[in-house]
Amino acid sequence: MTRKEYTGQDITVTFDLGRCIHARNCFLQLPDVFDPSKRPWVQPDNASPEEVAAMIRTCPSGALAYKRADGTDEKPPKINRLAVLENGPAVLVGEISVEDQPSETRVALCRCGLSKNKPYCDYSHVEGGFTATGEPAPKTPADAEGVGGVARAARKPDGPLLIDGNLEICSGTGKRIAKTEKAFLCRCGASKNKPFCDGSHKAVGFTDGES
């Protein structure tokens, strides 16, 4: 989906509706800038570029991004981190390349199997009634030693999401689940070892569908 741009004097905000998970950080933190009841709903000049950029960095899905007139880009953290959200997606923060696209710093990836914008979450877990704990205690691979670098995410056909690269996997409250260099993550919603794949996609006949 093409990003829509909202251009201000010192910062341009971009938005991809298909990746929004409705965390509402934008409105709750900067309602003068981000107000869905107004048109345009984004008005970048109603706050300083520093405030707008800082808020956007809290957008978990990467639906919101920014380009500053002074060329200051968002920097990825040094550790790639995946957080498992309660009844929701897996949120990745770091230096992330999804299916060979240019690296970005924030993405929310579907783990219910219902998204129409796979591998990204599109909020379909709410309509579909997906339930899965954000505090799993799965069987985990042995901890790896690496830190940082690009983590590449790609779908296996009608199967799990492979993340290849250094990654720390956490619960929704930040408890570390695993530290790994390669992870196969469930995206059919049926694994009994979430967030990891256990092969259940074969039993339930999972397919990519409309993705």
Image (cartoon, grey):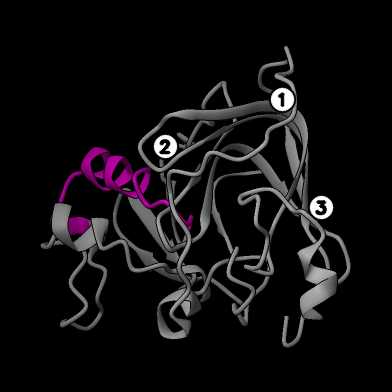
Q: Earlier in the sequence, mark 3 or mark 2?
A: 2
Q: Which residue is mark 1?
A: 149
Counting from the top left corner in percent of width and height, residue 185 is at 71, 51
Counting from the top left corner in percent of width and height, residue 111 is at 60, 63
Q: Amino acid at mark 1?
A: Gly
Circle 1/circle 3 CB separation < 8 Å: no
Mark 3 residue element? loop
Q: Residue furthest right?
A: 157
| Label 1 Cα crowd, 10 Å radius (few <14 / some 14-19 / many 20+) | some
Q: Is 116 in the magenta? A: no
Q: Which residue is mark 2?
A: 70
Q: Amino acid at mark 2?
A: Asp
Tell which of 154 and 89 is nearer to you.
Answer: 89
- Residue pictured at 59% horizontal, 75% vertical: 2
Residue 100 is marked as 3
Would residue 207 be seen by someone viewing this image from the given angle?
no
Query: Splitting the image into 4 quarters, where does residue 148 fall?
Result: top right
Q: Closer to the observer: label 1 or label 2?
A: 1
Counting from the top left corner in percent of width and height, residue 31 is at 12, 62
